[in-house]
Structures are given as C-alpha cells and as structure tokens.
Amino acid sequence: MLRKIAILSTLMLLTVSIQAGEYPKREMRAIWIATVANIDWPSKPGLSVDMQQDEMTGLFDLAKEYNLNTVIFQVRPATDAFFPSDLEPWSQWLTGEQGKAPDPFYDPLQFAIDECRKRGLELHLWLNPYRAVVDTAMASISDDHPVNKHPEWFVTYGKARYFNPGLPETRNHVATVVADVLKRYDVDALHFDDYFYPYRIAGEEFPDQEAFEKYPRGFAADEKDDWRRENVDMIIKQLHDTIEAVRPTVAFGISPFGVWRNQSDDPRGSATRAGQTNYDDLYANILRWQKEGWIDYITPQIYWHIGKEVADYAVIADWWSKNALGCRLYVGQAFYRIDRDSNDREWRSSRQIIKQIKLNRTYPNIDGSMFFSAKSLRNNPRRLKEKLLRRPFRYEALAPVNPRVEQITPGVPQNPVIELDNDSVRMSWEPGRNNEVFVIYKFKYGKAASNENAENIFAVTGENELTVEVTRETNPRKYYFVISALSPTNIESVVEYFKDISLSLPQ
C-alpha cells in the first residue's frame, strides 16, 4: 500500500513538473508597439485623439486576447516625444507636425500607462538613444528640436542624423531625458533597442573623428573601435546610475541585434556568420553590461528560423542562454516574418514561432519572449493567435520578477466579496497600497487552492472588480475563487478567499 502511495505521489509530482514546463506560470510575453514611421501606432499621423486612443486600447485588448502580459511602447523614436517634454518636441508621427501637441490635449504615455494598468499589463518605456532624424530629406523638424538648438552635438550618416556618441553632451542629454521621464511617470522598465552606433553603410565611415581627437581618453589612433565601444559603455553605465538614483524599482533592458560576435572573430562568440555584429559593428559590448550589472534584462533579436545556415535560431538562443550572466533573458522573436508568400518557406506558416517558444522553454536561462510587432496582433498571420492559444499560451502567465531591481512588497487585497447578480458573478475587493495588479484564481470545489500553476489563473486585472457571465466554467455551484496581488515588481502576495456563495444559492 505504501509503495502504491509513493508511486502515485511521484506520478503527481511528475505531472505538475511537466505541466509547469509546458505552461509556465511566470513567463515574459511582450509585444513591441513601434511608433517610428507609424509602424504600429498610430496607424497614420494626424488622427483625431479619439481615433488614436481607440487604436491604442485596441492593441492592448489584443495583447490580452493573445495572453500576453507586457507592452513595450516606443515613446522617443527620434529625439522626439510621445509625451509632453520641455527637452524634446512632440513627435511628427503623432500629429503630422513635429512640435505640435495633440488637440484636444492629452498625454499618450500617461494614457498608455493607465490603460495597461487596467488590463494588468506591464508597460516598458522604449527609447532610442542616438537617433535624431530618420530621414533628413523628409523629416518634419521643429525649431526647438535639439538638432537645431545644438547642431554641434550631431553628425549625419547616410540619410539620417545621430547624436555623436563621442561627446559627453550626448550622454548627459540622454540621461537628462531619462531622469525627467522616470520622475514623472510610473513605468515598469526602460528599454533600448539595437540602434547604438548605426549599422554600417558600405564605403562610408561614421563621422566621429573630430570627437575622437577632442576626447581621446588615452586611446591611440588604431584603437578607435575600442574608443567607440567605451563611448557606448559610458552611456549605459550613466543611464544605469540615473535609473538607480531616480526610480530604482525600474528595470533597464536592452534589445540588441541577435549576434554578439561570430566565433570566427572570437572563440567566445556564437557559431554564426552574421554580416554585422553588436561588438564589431554597433560597438555594443553587451556581455560587459550584463556582467557589470548595468542592465537588468537582455532581449537579443533572433529574427531567424531554426536551422538557418548562417544564423540558426537554436544555436543563437542556446548561446545567449549560456551567456545570460545573471540578466533576465527574453528572446526577441519575429511575428512580422510570418507570411504565406514569404520567400523563406519556414515563415509561410506560424508553426515556426510555436516551435521557437517550445524550444525557449528547454533552455535554463530563457525567461520568455518579446515579439515584433503589434500590428501582427491585428493581422493574425496564418492563424497565429489560434495556434498560440491552443498550446503554448493556453493560459495566462505572470511576468517574471527581476532580482536586479529594488523590490516592492505587495499589499494584500482586502475584503474580497463575491455576489451573484442575475446571470453574472461579480467579484470586488479593496486594493492594497502599492499600485498592485490582481490575480484571480479559480478552483473546483473539493480541490485545494494553489497559486502555483498557470492553469488556475482565471484573470489578471488592475481594476478592483471583475464581473463575469455565469457559464459552465464559472458556475458558482462548482467553482470557488481566490485573489492575490502583484506588486509593480511582480512580487505576489498571499491569496485571499472570496466568500463561498454556493451555500446561499437556491437549491
């Protein structure tokens, strides 16, 4: 008898372990919302405020429908702003004219924060550090843009204008922007993409020789590449220190190009043959930032398929897992590549993304995914949504805790009340004390409440009440509910029970 009980217990533990691997309760599931050139939002410049807000909340609702938990909102695509700023002008991609505020006035960033919180979504603030003008021939540039107020800070490379990374004024200005926005807005993370030094243009040298001669910092003429890398190191370190001083609970994340270095150039690199790399071409020494603790999460953009000859997704994901260096690691993945007419047959269905997510879960240091980009949620290429919800994203997941930031302790939801109102169940509660998000769990009567498994998550919300229609899946005669609170740093409280209303229902 004891042997049977032991075998049964082992099988139950194995089942829970397999389920936790297949449906993790903690997993980053993020979507990038790109504003540059109106890639994702708004769909075009100059829309009415109502249309802008409807489009944005539509994207947030879609994120919830896909069982995602995080939004990465681009608010500074080209030294401009999607929020009121005394430092940089309103973005041309919002109103059609750089420097022109929305009319009637509203703050898109605060609107996004409020709407994400209602839905229980994290919001990461996405800024580009160096890009100032995307296209000098076509851009709307206001008189108060920094390129006009401080032209000596900038250089032209190709058709674009960039801050000169070799100047201390560049680092100081970007840090000032970051400090300003973090003082005014309650966001969960600050996020930079892969545009540090720009991608190389064949036959054209980046024009920073004058800055090198003015601020050589002991580097010789043949060490200019190392000097450039140190320029980027210095801004990353300064931004880390700025975030820590202003809002230490905010995570600092970087989403670099997928390949750090090729193994042919460095034995520490990956078995790839990428044409450009972070270290050698973008002058981004990512591994140092991770090792030094200057960044809190890393999201390499691995936008290639499993088995690609020169850049195999599986090889690169494995390499980053082995080189996480204490950072949370989320993989950047390419919703946008899914296309029935793609030249690459691996992307003619959405199965490639499903395979990648499953593969990610086999690597010990990969904690989830960030997907590019939000318009794919609208397009639902090759029934991506249905395939995600059928298997890997069948249940909601909570975003991971980042151990590198200062943690916030959650309050406990008070006085949870559940009531039957005709054909609906209404749950309400009093909030905690720290802008918590709330997690509702559902259990069958006779089954002990446990908040360990994703399958038990019924809803995640930032509201203080939830009303659901009575169905077979919510029948209060069969199910009971408990609630917990998540702090802004994703620490979860103990659970509180809603009262048992089944006893008061007519028999």
Image (tube, rainbow, N blue to C red):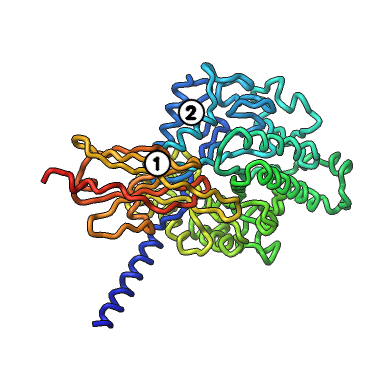
- Does any portion of residue 334 appear in the rendered image? no
Given residues 374 and 298, the one toward you in this image is 298
Looking at the image, can residue 32 be seen? Answer: yes
Query: Would residue 457 be found to the left or right of residue 346 on screen?
Result: left
- The residue nearer to you, when weighing 23 against 245, is 245
Identify whether 175 is placed above or below 108.
below
- The three-letter code of the residue at mark 1 reads Thr
Q: Which residue is identified by label 2?
A: 43
Q: CA distance from mark 1 to mark 2?
A: 27 Å
Q: Secondary structure at mark 2?
A: loop
Q: State left or right for residue 116 relative to residue 443.
A: right
Q: Residue at x 66, y 44 (%)?
A: 243
Q: x and y percent of residue 404 in the render?
A: 60, 54
Front residue of this view, candidates 21 and 454: 454
Write the residue at 68% across / 30% down. 133
CB-based contact (under 8 Å), mark 1 and mark 2: no
In the drawing, what numbered circle is on residue 461? 1
Q: Classify the position of the N terminus by image quarter.
A: bottom left
